[in-house]
Image: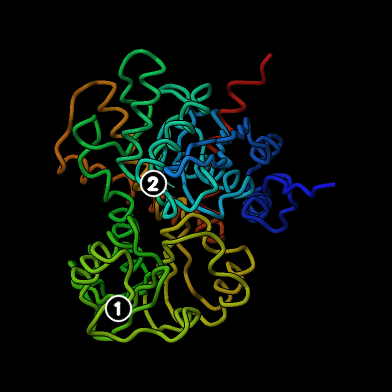
Amino acid sequence: MIKHELPSYLQQQSQGPWEVYLEQIDRVTPHLGSLARWIETLKRPKRILIVDVPIERDDGSIAHFEGYRVQHNTSRGPGKGGVRFHQDVSLSEVMALSAWMTVKNAAVNVPYGGAKGGIRVDPRQLSKAELQRMTRRYTSEINIIIGPTKDIPAPDVNTNEEIMAWMMDTYSMNQGSTASGVVTGKPISLGGSLGRQEATGRGVFVIGSECAVRKGLDPNRLRIAIQGFGNVGGVAARLFAESGARVVAIQDHATTIVDEGGLDVAAALEHARRTGSLAGFPGCAHLAKQDEFWDIDCDLLIPAALEQQINAANAGRIKAAIVLEGANGPTTPGADDILADRGILVVPDVIANAGGVTVSYFEWVQDFSSFFWTEEEINARLTRIMRDALASVWQIAEDRGVSLRTAAFIVGCTRVLQAREMRGLYP
Ligand code: GLU
């Protein structure tokens, strides 16, 4: 008998990101009072859609990819969250990412539930035409559950405004009319918002600067180390460098560049844009091993790549005052404990990287009203929302003697479960 390879969602996945999320929920539950009665709501995604995404390759062969869209919760509004294209996308990962969107959207109080999508594919192996066919087929397959008032996708790892344009077009062609509000992170000319592309990195910068001040660090003398040089790490690096901070290390998928005197971030961005990575970037040292990144002496360490990067194995080596989570889920609960014991402040993803979805919300509002705001208005509103969210989470952390993550989960989960309770169970 031929042995068939099972799809990844039927293979056993231990300790995936979903288990990390469940542990975070267990840690917040004792702080939720009578709302804890509803906690199971947060441990079960509302709806999971797994789709087959077949495409014809340029050489005439047929390829199949696993696609996902998970709507974790819609108690406070439509599902909202990005779509990721990555070879390691799994059901556990998309479930966790959708749940973190629920908590994040509630923590910064934008009127959404949480959702996330993804395709298990290495997009670098596809031509542009293949990428477009895959995106369109995926959008058609999830068309039954998305929509401007149902669930609104956006960019995430390896997806961008061009892919959002194809998603918007595919959905609109199926509907028979242009529906710009079905996705956010679109090109400006298709109803995108000024400031959206850099919003996540800008939010990381705003929250990082504010936390540095709150920790008594001089914002003009900060030393920053960043893992990830995409749309989050790249923008955060640029804004910190422009503010006078020193970016002393940047790691991407190919290499880690270091310079204690401060890297030339603008030149590094240009090099990465031109060549596809930081490999061969001149004028600074390159670490011999990627793992040595965790030993770098800095004030702010910004993981801005993938999940579970900071874990029990490396948390003891980190030499930073603050870990600022640009990525979703970069720190495991075990690492959270080690960092807390060592007096290192962890600023959780659900606050630190919420700038992206906050400006997605502005984009969606602008699309509905067909009235567009200036970049100054957008950045000012973004900064205010981020600072206010941090201030209330900080206060709760102090009052209750809990970590910023647990405090952010207290705020987010309370809002979600209050909505759940007020709405009541149907039928
Ligand atoms: N993918 C981003 C995130 O993880 C943004 C999601 C959105 O704008 O909907 O928060």
Pick the quarter of the image with the C terminus. Answer: top right
**In the rendered view, would you say 343 is above or below 117?**
below
Q: Secondary structure at mark 1?
A: loop
Q: Is residue 313 above or below residue 69?
A: below
Q: Which mark is residue 130?
A: none
Residue 280: give its label. Answer: 1
Q: Would residue 324 be found to the left or right of residue 48 on screen?
A: left
Give the residue drawn at x 54%, y 29%: 74
Front-most of residues 320 and 400: 320
Q: Position of residue 109 (x, y in %)?
A: 42, 38
Residue type beneath disc 2: Thr
404 or 173, nearer to the observer: 173
Crowd band around label 1 with a 10 angstrom C-alpha radius: few (<14), some (14–19), many (20+): some
Q: Indicate the amino acid at tag 1.
A: Gly
Image quadrant assignment for residue 149: top left
Q: Residue at x 36, y 74 (%)?
A: 225
User: Height in image: 331 above or below 356?
Assistant: below
Q: Position of residue 377 (x, y in %)?
A: 17, 40
